[in-house]
Image: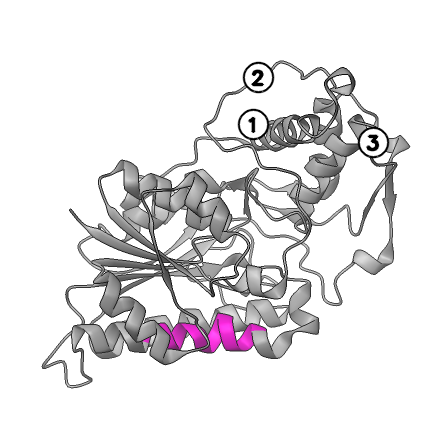
Amino acid sequence: MPRALITGITGQDGMYLAEHLLGLGYDVSGMVRGQDNPKRRTVEALLPDVRLVEGDLLDATSLRTTLQHAQPDEVYNLAAMSYVPYSWGQSEVTAAINGVGVLRILDAVRALTGASGSRANSGAGVRFYQASSSEMFGLAQETPQRETTPFHPRSPYGAAKAYAHYITVNVRESYNLFACGGILFNHESPRRGAEFVTRKISLAVARIKAGLQDELVLGNLDARRDWGFAGDYVRAMHLMLQQDAPDDFVIGTGETHTVREFVDLAFARAGLDPERYVRVDAEFIRPAEVDVLLADASKAHRVLGWRPQVDFAGLVDMMVDADVAAVARTLPAGERPVRRTERRTVPHAEPEPEAPETTQERAA
């Protein structure tokens, strides 16, 4: 039975990846940061077959202990400060976790495998996945973006991810470690945190439909993103670590949509008119905006055989339906809105309405 360790197990990617690996017969361990992590209970309820181990990307000793305990064949580093707007106000901790934290876990993997710079002892035996990000492209030098597109990050988050990506490549080349970087474009799901714009929209739609909220306040409605379903993207992570040689891959849908399009589809799914409820506030516009991110995932198509299965409209429907159902469960029976008929069926867990995560939760 192959063994996998997933850092960031409490995030949407961590949970979907754990489900995928368990379905493939893996023994899965998930790293959590601290006993008081409020999302620990969610993982324990949803994924009872996952063994939770404590570790912290800020603490090199804890990472070595975690790896010794889990003895993984594959390590998926998904832990990060994941909310880009917060990275301006918390730039130091973003750099420490998203950047230097990756160096710490790579050093822990090297220690576990006995890899040395002389290559007398290589990093064979453990395969490593680093969650890189399309935010590294930032002010993109070309569109669409591919593996060879230069990075020009526009946030502390993107800059830290660029460091992490390059240090992963450096360790791969220096110590012969099987280490891959997945440059994932925006991927969403009903498990997304409520502070992210897609989930903010779907949850607001559900609450407005239920009469619990009067308006939705957003920033730049014209920002364009390549949005896909997180459950599709974790399949690509696993495929990267099954190849004969390590490499980096861009993962995305190859389609771009505006925030306004997401809003229009979400409100239409609930039978609501967005013009009545949506307001723009400059407070929610980033200091340095990333205007267009669009993936060229042709290398992943060709080498990994990977393609997304959920389209943009299906993703919006999934998220709205899940939040409408979750909000309805909080209402007295006589006040529950009638749920619209689903056009697409995709397995997912319907979340409870949630408040924005704390710094510790996002980093777990």
Residue 5 visible here: yes
Residue 48 vs residue 306, the one in the foreground: 48
Dot 2 or dot 1: first in sequence order is 1
Q: Are marks 2 and 1 in contact (CB under 8 Å)?
A: yes
User: What is the image's colouring?
Assistant: one colour
C-alpha distance separating marks 3 and 1:
19 Å
Q: Which residue is mark 1?
A: 314
The residue labelled by disc 2 is 343
- Evaluate if marks 3 and 1 touch, with contact meaning CB atoms under 8 Å apart: no
Q: Nearer the viewer, residue 63 or 124?
A: 63
Separation of marks 2 and 1 at Cα, in angstroms: 8 Å
Q: Is residue 45 left or right of residue 303?
A: right
| Crowd around label 1: few <14 · some 14–19 · many ≥20 (10 Å) | some
Q: Amino acid at mark 2?
A: Arg
Do labels 3 and 2 touch, CB within 8 Å?
A: no
- Lateral position of residue 210 relative to residue 321, left or right: right
Q: Is residue 256 above or below residue 81?
A: above
158 up-or-down from 170: above or below: above
Provide residue 253's location: percent of width, then percent of height. 49, 40
Label 3 vs label 2: CA separation? Answer: 21 Å
- Residue at the spot x=18%, y=50% of the render? 2
The x, y position of residue 1, in whole percent, is 15, 46
- Residue 307 image position (x, y, % from top left): 39, 37
Q: Is residue 74 magenta?
A: no
Question: Which numbered dot is residue 52?
Answer: none
Residue tagged 3:
274
Q: Main secondary structure of the magenta part?
A: helix
Q: Which residues are magenta?
A: 94-106
The residue lying toward the viewer, choosing from 295 and 108, is 108
Residue found at x 50% / y 21%? 345
Q: Is label 3 in a helix, a strand or a loop?
A: helix
